[in-house]
Image: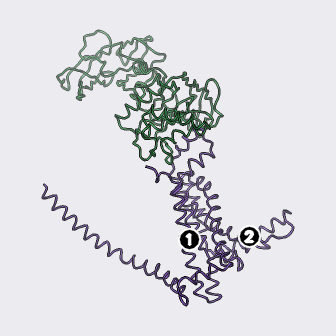
Amino acid sequence: MAELEIKNLNMSYDKHLEILKSLNLHVKNGELISILGPSGCGKTTTLRIIAGLLRQTDGQVLIDGKDVSKLPVHKRNFGMVFQSYALFPHLNVFDNVAFGLRQRKEKVSIIQKRVNDILIATGLKKLEKRFPDALSGGQQQRVSLARALVVNPKLLLLDEPLSNLDAKLRVSMREEIRRLQQLMHTTTVFVTHDQEECFAISDRVAVMNQGVIEQFDTPQKIYRAPKTVFVARFIGYENFLSVTKKISSTSFYVKNVKLDINSTVDGVTSLSIRPNQIVLGSTAKTNIVSGEIQSSVFLGNAYRYTVSTCIGNLKVDYLGSKRLSNGQNVQLELPAAALLGLKK
Amino acid sequence: MKICYSIFTTYEQEMIKIRNRSAFLLLLPGVLAILLFLFFPVIQIALPTFAGHFGLSNYITFLQSHYNQGVLIRTLIIAFITMIITLTLGLPLSVWIARQRSTVRNLLSVVILFPILTNAVVRNFTWIIILGKNGVLNTLLLKLNFIDQPLTLLYSDMAIVIGSVYLFLPIMVTSLVSSVQELNVEVEEAAAILGSRPLVTFFKVMIPQLTTGILTGCILVFAGAMTAYTTPQLLGGNRHLVMSTLIYQQAMTLGDWSSASVVAIILIILTVLVLGMMRLVAKQLDRRSVND
């Protein structure tokens, strides 16, 4: 249980290759946050710096207001779960889980009790005598989680812990992680490239791109109101329209079409809308653009049309049961409520 | 379908039979070569040890001699100390080499192996030059005023150990490096995060995972040091005999081939016994094979 604060974190391997660019992050006590981003965005680097496995070029990592930047890894009292599980292959499940407590020179009776409790909580009690190579991936991940949590770490760090598991197991494991995290009230940083995974269990999500956190918000806000082009694209927005001229903070020209939006951010450079929010065949007077159907794809719940318009090709999902033919002219409405203003 | 299947399997079985027969034919030259070049000489060595006297009396006579006992124990101790030193020096060195970038690692591996490429006699002569009475080391120590008169370094057990360590370190390192390379670094990082100091991680996490590599290295070094001839001959001289130099002395100097054979057979048995013991110890240490 602790509060984590990252201040102006910089990381570069040499002068030209900047991995992190003055990163700031504040995680509240008992909160589970995710760092979401594509591979190479610096999310794992950030986690390894927090853990102390990497030394930052510049900046601070604060735990409860105290700078731990100079503290070696083994004195930080964190827990970490690795993508490869990283269990001790020469120790059985019980000894794997007991490792951290033994390093802390706890009494044998206390070790016995705490390891027992966590093995029961994670459903591993029956497997305590097994060695890692006799466990399935899910079981190994559970041992790894138990091993990290049994020491009551100030901070739990999860480095893509689910990416080696199959789809079904991934869902149940992420719920398991959330359950244990809530139970022990451990401040947790979860690194992933899977948005569904992190939306499902996080209190807040930091979307990261090229060493910068683009947006740090609740999953709902990230999903419904992304602020930058990158975030919108990463969570599945399509149809990006470059602003030609700004009329007011909620009104823009894209080429010669005037489009209004309801809510806005500073410095809008693009507008975006999800394919299923464009209204095909609308009779509205504003936010209207006309175009011609180029092609269509059947998605199951709808047809996705590519419509060429004077502001570019737009992707439109339309639920009508009959497929519209190519070459047909259609009116598209981009409702102001659904249209987003985005920064670069 | 069923008929097809059974026809197919008889066909398969027939193929396997033919393959087995031809495989045996292919193996034959190798088997013959091993019998001829490996076992025949050993039998040839063993036969004269029973000549003249019945049973094991030649062996008993050999083992009753205090001088011979001394040689035997010296051989064991030198081989054991050599093994321990190469292991102690080799472990950190191997970890360091194995964790370098691949280009640096390959370069270091070549450097480590380089001494093996030189002739054994030449290699030992370098130690004669270093350890001799007027050698490099004595000259240096005298110049620095650490000692008043030259130390007797050459022609001692220590000289044999030094020469053997130099000889066998590359072999130990080579077998350890491949083991270390297989380790998952994240396992050590996990240990560190759980509060384990670097030294504890080394002994409690890394070494237990390296048992196979350590065993291989130890077996190679121990067997090599037990049976080495050039190094003890050149660096130990005539007064510090080990089993292999004793064999040479018995056979070539004294012309007593039967005694030489006795020593040779005892050396073989002893080496096999010690290696068997090492395997047992390693199996005990590797708890995974015991459990579950």
Rendered shade, chain A: green
Q: Which circle marks residue A73 in the picture?
A: none
Q: Is residue A25 left or right of residue A199?
A: right
**Residue A96, position as x, y percentages in the image:** 51, 41
Q: Chain of mark 1?
A: B
- One can see residue A75 in this view: yes
Residue at figure coordinates x 60%, y 52% from the top left? B96
Q: Which circle marks residue B130 in the picture?
A: 2
Residue at figure coordinates x 49%, y 43% from the top left? A87
Residue A223 image-quadrant placement: top left
- One can see residue A53 in this view: no
Q: Which circle marks residue B271 in the picture?
A: 1
Q: Is residue B222 left or right of residue A295?
A: right
Rendered shade, chain B: purple
SS of the residue at dot 1? helix
Quadrant position of the N terminus of chain A in the picture: top right
Q: In the image shown, does B76 or A200 lie closer to the viewer?
A: B76
Q: In the image shown, does B173 or A181 lie closer to the viewer?
A: A181
